Image: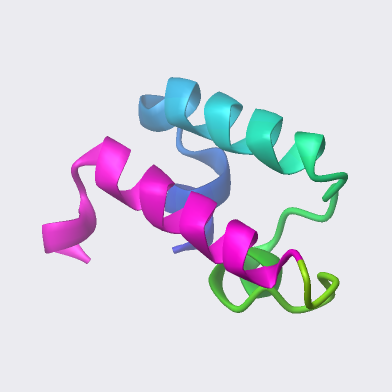
């Protein structure tokens, strides 16, 4: 899961977009807890982080395989 969400070169453009949007929210910690549970994220930003993670999953087309 970590490889897919954070490192897989197959999804480089999706990773770049996700990092860009999270950076705009001043979220710099990219790990599984922050992407999947929005932990260590200010409560006001949690819905946005989860929304962006879901958008990443949809854009990769891999959601049915997870």
Which residues, given as a range, are shown in magenta? 45-66
Residue 5 spot, x, y in % from top left: 49, 51
The picture quadrant where one finds residue 7 is: top right
| Residue located 61% across and 58% down the image | 48
The picture quadrant where one finds residue 10 is: top left
Which residue ends up furthest to the top in the rendered image?
A: 13
Residue 22 spot, x, y in % from top left: 71, 43
* Quadrant, the N terminus: bottom left
The picture quadrant where one finds residue 14 is: top left
Residue 43 spot, x, y in % from top left: 79, 78
Residue 34 drawn in magenta: no
Give the answer, above or below, for where 35 lies relative to 52: below
Left or right: residue 34 compared with residue 47: right
Give the answer, above or below, for where 65 lies relative to 41: above
Dominant secondary structure, magenta = helix
Query: 11 or 42, which lies in front?
Result: 42
| Residue located 12% across and 60% down the image | 64
Give the answer, above or below, for where 42 lies relative to 15: below
Residue 29 spot, x, y in % from top left: 83, 55
| Residue located 84% across and 75% down the image | 40
Which residue ends up furthest to the left in the rendered image?
A: 64
């Amino acid at each position: 899961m970590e490889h897919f969400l954070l490192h897989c070169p197959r999804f480089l453009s999706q990773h770049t977009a996700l990092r860009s949007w999270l950076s705009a929210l001043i979220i710099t910690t990219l790990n599984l807890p922050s992407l999947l549970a929005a932990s260590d994220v200010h409560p006001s930003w949690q819905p946005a982080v989860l929304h962006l993670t879901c958008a990443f999953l949809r854009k990769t087309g891999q959601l049915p395989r997870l």
